[in-house]
Amino acid sequence: MATATATTLVGRLKSHAAGFPRPFWLLTAGWFIYVLGYECGYPFESIYLNEKLGISVTAIGLIYGFAEIGGLPAQVAGGAIADHAGRKPVLLIGIAATMTLFVGLALVHSTPLVVLLIVLEASCGWSFFQMSSNAIISDALPEKRRTEGYSISRTASAGGIVVGPLLGGLLLRHDPTYRWPFLVGGAFCAVIFVIVLLRMPETRPAVAATHARVRDTLAGYVHVLRDRRLLAFSGVTLLPLYCHGQFLMTFPILLRDSVGVSPGTVGLLYSLYALTNMLVQYPLGRRLREADRMKVMAAASTFMCVGLAGAAFAPKGPATAVFVAVIALGTALLQPFSVTVVSHLAPVRLRGRYMGAWTLVWTTGIALGPIFGGVAMDRLGGRGAYTLVLAAGLTGAVLYLVLSRRGTMERPREEAEAV
C-alpha cells in the first residue's frame, strides 16, 4: 500500500513538473546555484571590509548605499538590453558581475578596487540576474501559471539562502582570512554561468525582437512611464519594500540592542526565516494563484510589518521566532505576487523594460530601509523606528485594497497587444 501511494505521488509530481518547460527548470536550478554561491560570500562582506580592510561601519553603509543608487541607470539599461539583445546575455552579465566581485574580494586587498567591484556588482550583478530571470519566466509560462512559477523559483532561491551561509560559515572556520568563502561563492557562480551559456535557450518572444539601436530601445521606457497602473502599484509597493529593507539591514541591530538577542541567535533566526520561506513559498503560490493579487499583496504588507514590529516589542524568547516566521510569510507572498502583477501589466514587446523598471523599484524600496531606518533608529530608538515600520506596512495594505476595489490593475488584452 505504501509503495503504491509513493508511486502515485511520484507520478503526480512528474506530471505536474511536465507542465513547466525545460528553460523554466534550468532557470530554477540556476536560482538555487547562483543564490547558494551568492549567500556563501555575501553575509561576510561587511565583516571583511571592516575587519580586514579597516573600513568603518559608517563608511561601509555609505559604500553600499551609494553603490545601489549609482547602479540604477545600469538597471534601466539592462531592461532595454533584455528586449534588444535577449534575456540570456543580461543573465550572463549578472552572473559574471557577481562572480567577479567574489573572486576579487578573495584576491584583491586594495580598498579602491574593492569599492569598484562592489559598485560593479550593485549595478549589473544581482539586479541583472533578477530582471532577466523574471522576464524568462514570464516568457516561458502562460499567465495563469506565472505566480506558481515565480513561487517555485523563489523556493529554489530560499534553499540557496539556507545552504549558502552554512557552507560559508563552515569554510570560514578553516580559513579566517575569508578567502575560501569568497572563492567558493565565485565558483558556484562560474558553474551556473557555464550551464546558462551552454544549455539555456533564448526565450525572448519574436514580437519583442528588434534590430533598432539600443538608444531607440531605451525610448520604450516612455511607454512604461505612461502606464498609470504600474506607477500606482510601484508607489504603493515602496511601503512594504521599506519594511523589507529594514529586515535586511537594521533588524539585526534592533534584535541585539532593543530585544537583547545575541549575534549567534540572530544568525539562527535568519536561518529560520529562510527555511520558513522555502517551505511555504510554493504551497502559497499554488493555492493563491487565482486569488485577487491586490488582496494578497495587502496580506503580504501586513504580515511583513506586523512581524517586524511584533519582534521589536515582544519579549526575547519563542515569540521572537514566531514573529520572524510571520515576516517570512510576508516575503513569500510579496516576492512572487508582485512580479506576477508586473508581468501581467507588461506588453510582450516591452516585457524586458517592464522588468527593468520593476527591478529599479525593488532596489529603491529596499534602499529606503537602511537610509531612513538608520536615521529613525538614531532619533527614535529601535522600537520607535519600528512603530513607523508598522505604520508604513499597514498603510500599504490599505492602499492595495483601494487598488483592488477600483480594479486598476487589470489591463485589457487588446490594449496590451496594441502598445
Image (spheres, helix red, strand yellow):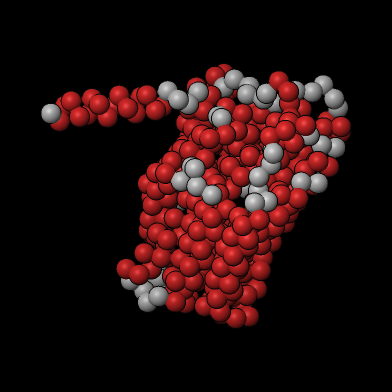
Q: Is residue 419 visible?
A: yes
Report x, y in % for residue 32: 47, 37
Report x, y in % for residue 301: 54, 60
Camera-nearest residue between 113 and 241: 241
Camera-nearest residue between 404 and 28: 404
Q: Does 138 sit above or below residue 121?
A: above
Q: Is residue 89 visible?
A: no
Q: Which residue appears farthest toward the left when viewing the image?
A: 1
| Picture quadrant where residue 356 is located | top right
Q: Specify whether 67 is left or right of 20.
A: right
Q: Does 379 sit above or below residue 360?
A: below
| Picture quadrant where residue 351 is located | top right
Q: Specify whether 39 is left or right of 401.
A: left
Report x, y in % for residue 205: 67, 23
How many numbered marks, from 0 up?
Answer: 0
Residue at left offset 42%, top offset 61%: 326
Q: Does 214 sit above or below residue 385?
A: above
- The quadrant the C terminus occupies is top right
Residue at left offset 61%, top offset 77%: 378
Report x, y in % for residue 247: 52, 61
Residue at left offset 36%, top offset 64%: 322
Residue at left offset 63%, top offset 34%: 135
- The quadrant the N terminus occupies is top left
Q: Specify whether 377 is left or right of 358.
A: left
Q: Does 386 sit above or below residue 166?
A: below
Camera-nearest residue between 134 and 223: 223
